[in-house]
Image: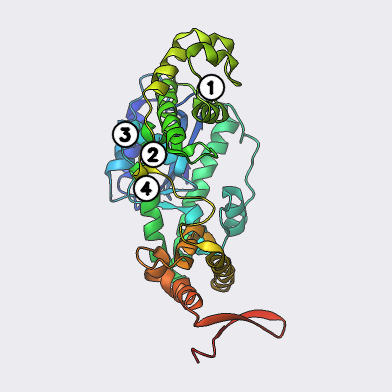
């Protein structure tokens, strides 16, 4: 494979992208920093085909990234391959308002091949290629310039291995007939709504014990305010206000700005500064959360009850058995909330009752819930058996 020197000029990038536009797939990775900023600071982009690989410096003066971004989001003839690509897709979305399509994520594919729930990249490479990766530059400061040869070699190595890994995984998926299993997961990963980061929904990421509409309404208002403050200053949202402080203010709102000096997690300056005044304005404008916005209980699905909770636990046990027998990650087959909904009596709109998930697990899950299937011990092993009534 041809490894190019670090690309820092627009002509070289354009020529690279023109060649890659004719490939069946490209492997993509990014290096970024986000410890001190709201927006991820893109520091390096690595891309490879089976024939060539390059690292691109987005911080190079005058570099036009548009040929690369066009290849990633507008060329549907080239498959884009990532590993655990959520943060990479977020960066691309922030730059373009779109996500790469079509795409393939090797971490998700590994679940279909029974290689683990969230297998790390180095473990996957070692498992399928027999190669141990150099992790020496893993925690480097990618924002500093110039980048040395070891950093660049480390970064490019990620995509050269990925370009070798992908065809092997694809062949395994074809042999097992599990390629179609991944379509829905890849579409879900590539959904731009995952990366839009709507301030009006920011409150859903904050843990809070209360389920009172007025408390959650205040949480929604000040979480949206914090999101906009963090964006405008390009600071991590936690630098504006920690989640714990946000939840505390929502549950116990101060009567006036002066009282902010007594809120744990805020500096005394908030009693009189502009940011404190803006936060109080957001708090005063808050409205109780509407019934349609109220979140479901996290512990159990509505209507599940004690008996239903036991059934849900049996379904989780069945899922472990079926995932082990089929050599596929349980997480790919079903989520806990779906199992609880099935135990509570829901039948419509559950992915485990559709397509391959129904064949692999859903049919047996339905039989277990409706009394046609039971657990039994035979020769010291846990097995599934048809009930006498069903027989």
| Nearer the observer, 2 or 169 | 169
10 Å crowding of disc 1: few (<14), some (14-19), many (20+): few
- Image quadrant where residue 63 sits: top left
Q: Secondary structure at mark 2?
A: helix
10 Å crowding of disc 3: few (<14), some (14-19), many (20+): some
Label 4, label 3: how far apart the Cα atoms are: 14 Å
Q: Which mark is residue 23?
A: none
10 Å crowding of disc 4: few (<14), some (14-19), many (20+): many
Marks 3 and 4: in contact by CB < 8 Å? no
Q: Which mark is residue 239?
A: 1
**Of marks 3 and 2, the one in the foreground:** 2
Where is 260 relative to 152, above or below? above
Residue positioned 51% across, 20% down in the render: 254
Q: Secondary structure at mark 4?
A: loop
**Of marks 4 and 1, the one in the foreground:** 1
**Of marks 2 and 1, the one in the foreground:** 1
Nearer-N-terminus badge (4/1): 4
Where is 360 relative to 83, above or below? below
Label 3, label 2: how far apart the Cα atoms are: 11 Å
**Of marks 3 and 1, the one in the foreground:** 1
Q: Which residue is mark 3?
A: 96
Q: Secondary structure at mark 1?
A: helix
Label 4, label 1: how far apart the Cα atoms are: 29 Å
- Residue sitting at the far right: 380
Q: Which residue is mark 4?
A: 190
Q: Which residue is mark 2?
A: 195
Nearer-N-terminus badge (4/3): 3
């Amino acid at each position: 494979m041809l490894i190019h020197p670090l690309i820092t000029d627009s002509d070289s990038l354009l020529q690279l992208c023109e060649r890659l536009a004719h490939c069946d797939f490209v492997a993509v990775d990014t290096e970024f920093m986000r410890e001190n900023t709201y927006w991820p600071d893109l520091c390096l982009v690595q891309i490879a085909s089976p024939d060539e690989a390059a690292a691109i410096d987005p911080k190079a003066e005058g570099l036009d990234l548009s040929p690369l971004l066009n290849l990633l989001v507008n060329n549907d003839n080239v498959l884009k391959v990532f590993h655990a690509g959520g943060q990479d897709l977020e960066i691309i979305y922030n730059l373009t308002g779109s996500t790469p399509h079509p795409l393939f994520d090797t971490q998700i594919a590994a679940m279909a091949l029974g290689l683990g729930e969230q297998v790390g990249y180095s473990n996957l490479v070692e498992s399928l290629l027999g190669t141990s990766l150099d992790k020496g530059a893993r925690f480097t400061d990618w924002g500093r310039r110039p980048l040395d040869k070891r950093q660049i070699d480390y970064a490019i190595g990620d995509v050269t291995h990925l370009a070798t890994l992908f065809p092997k995984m694809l062949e395994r998926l074809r042999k097992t007939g599990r390629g179609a299993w991944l379509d829905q997961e890849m579409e879900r990963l590539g959904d731009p709504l995952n990366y839009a980061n709507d301030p009006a929904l920011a409150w859903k990421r904050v843990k809070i014990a209360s389920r009172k509409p007025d408390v959650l309404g205040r949480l929604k208002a000040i979480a949206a305010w914090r999101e906009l403050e963090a964006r405008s200053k390009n600071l991590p949202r936690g630098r504006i206000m920690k989640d714990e402080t946000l939840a505390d203010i929502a549950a116990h709102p101060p009567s006036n700005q002066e009282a902010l000096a007594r809120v744990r997690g805020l500096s005394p300056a908030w009693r009189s500064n502009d940011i404190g005044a803006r936060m109080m304005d957001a708090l005063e404008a808050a409205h109780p959360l509407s019934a349609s916005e109220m979140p479901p209980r996290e512990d159990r699905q509505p209507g599940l009850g004690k008996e239903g909770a036991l059934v849900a636990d049996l379904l989780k046990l069945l899922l472990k058995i079926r995932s082990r027998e089929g050599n596929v990650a349980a997480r790919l087959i079903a989520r806990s909330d779906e199992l609880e909904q099935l135990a509570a009596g829901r039948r419509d709109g559950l992915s485990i009752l559709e397509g391959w998930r129904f064949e692999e697990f859903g049919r047996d899950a339905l039989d277990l819930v409706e009394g046609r299937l039971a657990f039994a011990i035979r020769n010291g092993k846990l097995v599934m058996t048809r009930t006498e009534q069903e027989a």
